[in-house]
Structure formats: C-alpha cells, structure tokens
Image (cartoon, rainbow, N blue to C red):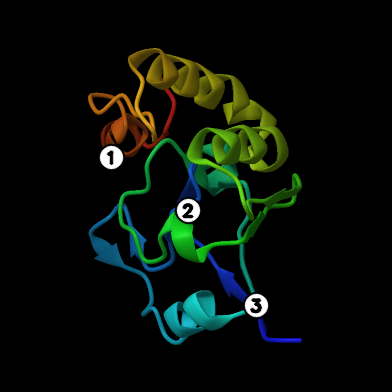
Amino acid sequence: MGIIGINTALEFDLYGNVNSTHVGGTRMMNGIGGSGDFARNAHLAIFVTKSIAKAGAISSVVPMVSHVDHTEHDVDILVTEIGLADLRGLAPRERARVIIDNCVHPAYREALNDYFRRACAIGGHTPHVLRDALSWHLNLEETGRMLAI
C-alpha cells in the first residue's frame, strides 16, 4: 500500500510548492525534519495548513512561496480548512485552478485569481508576474498585512 506522509506547511503557492520552515523566507520557524524524506518517498504526500493566520492578515496560499522546502513535483495533496486540492497528474495551470478553488480563504480568493489571470496573460508553462510574485510578503513586512486595505 505504501506510506501516506502528512506534514505541516507554513505556506504553499498556487502551483503546489511548499514552505515548511521559514517565515517570510528568512526566519526559520522549525527544521524540515523528515518531511522531505516522506514527501519524496510516500505513496501520498499530503501537506496541511490553515488558509489564513494572524486574524486574516496572512494568507497561507500565496502567488509564490518565500522559501521552497518541497517542490510541486513532491506534493500530491494540499489541505486547508476550506478544502482539499488533489494535484496528482495535473499541469501547473490546472494545479493553480484546483488550489485557488479548493484551498484559498474567501478573503484572498479574488486577489489570487487576479494574480493568476495576469500571470497567464504573460504566458509560460508556470506563469508568474515576477514583479508581483512576492508582493504579498513585501506588503506583510511593510504593513503587517499581505493585502493592501
């Protein structure tokens, strides 16, 4: 049957890359432990987190993670209290749609949909607006919230 590995994520991005260790990309919250071994070798690699943190000031689903511990290639399923995104067999754009529709908190869904639309207009296999990819993290550093009010 194989191992089902369930690990915690601090954040994940719309393509399924997971940050398990670094707040804001630079401040280590915890070590990676064995999660890398489980993610790469499990029959099912599942990562779970809350969709928001700090009373809604932070989204756990972002355009691009600030640090990558687990790439989209090692992640099968993402879970928040909003729902579950089964990413197995999906291309990057399909992954993004499933993640946005099933895991993103409603307060952040419109902003992430907007980012994804703009990224797709630019094109590429894994579309990004590089100028804005980490803007949510920069807003958090500057204002204490990921989205401008």
Can you identify the residue that label 2 sits on? 11
Q: Are the residues at dot 2 and dot 3 in contact (C-beta closer than 8 Å)?
A: no
Task: Name the quadrant of the N terminus.
Answer: bottom right
Of badges 1 and 3, the one in the foreground is 3
The three-letter amino acid code for the residue at tag 2 is Glu
Q: Residue 53, image x and y in percent?
A: 55, 49
Q: Kindly state the secondary structure of the residue where label 1 is placed.
A: helix
Q: Residues within 10 Å of mark 3 (few under 14, many from 20)?
A: some
Crowding around mark 1 (Cα neighbors within 10 Å: few <14, some 14 to 19, many 20+) is few
Residue beneath label 1, please?
141
- Specify which label sits upstream in the sequence, 2 or 3: 2
Foreground of the two, 135 or 140? 135
Q: Residue at x 40, y 60 (%)?
A: 71
Measure how far apart labels 2 and 1 are at the Cα level. 16 Å
Asked where in the image residue 55 lies, by quadrant, the reply is top right
Compare marks 1 and 3 and give the one earlier in the sequence.
3
Q: Decide which of 56, 3 is in the foreground and name it.
A: 3
Pointer 2 local density, CA inside 10 Å: few below 14, some 14–19, many at least 20? many
Instruction: Judge depth for marks 2 and 1 and give the one in front.
Output: 2
Q: Secondary structure at mark 3?
A: loop
Instruction: Tell me the quarter of the picture where residue 19 sits.
Output: bottom left
- The circle drawn on residue 43 is 3
Q: Is 12 above or below relative to 143? A: below
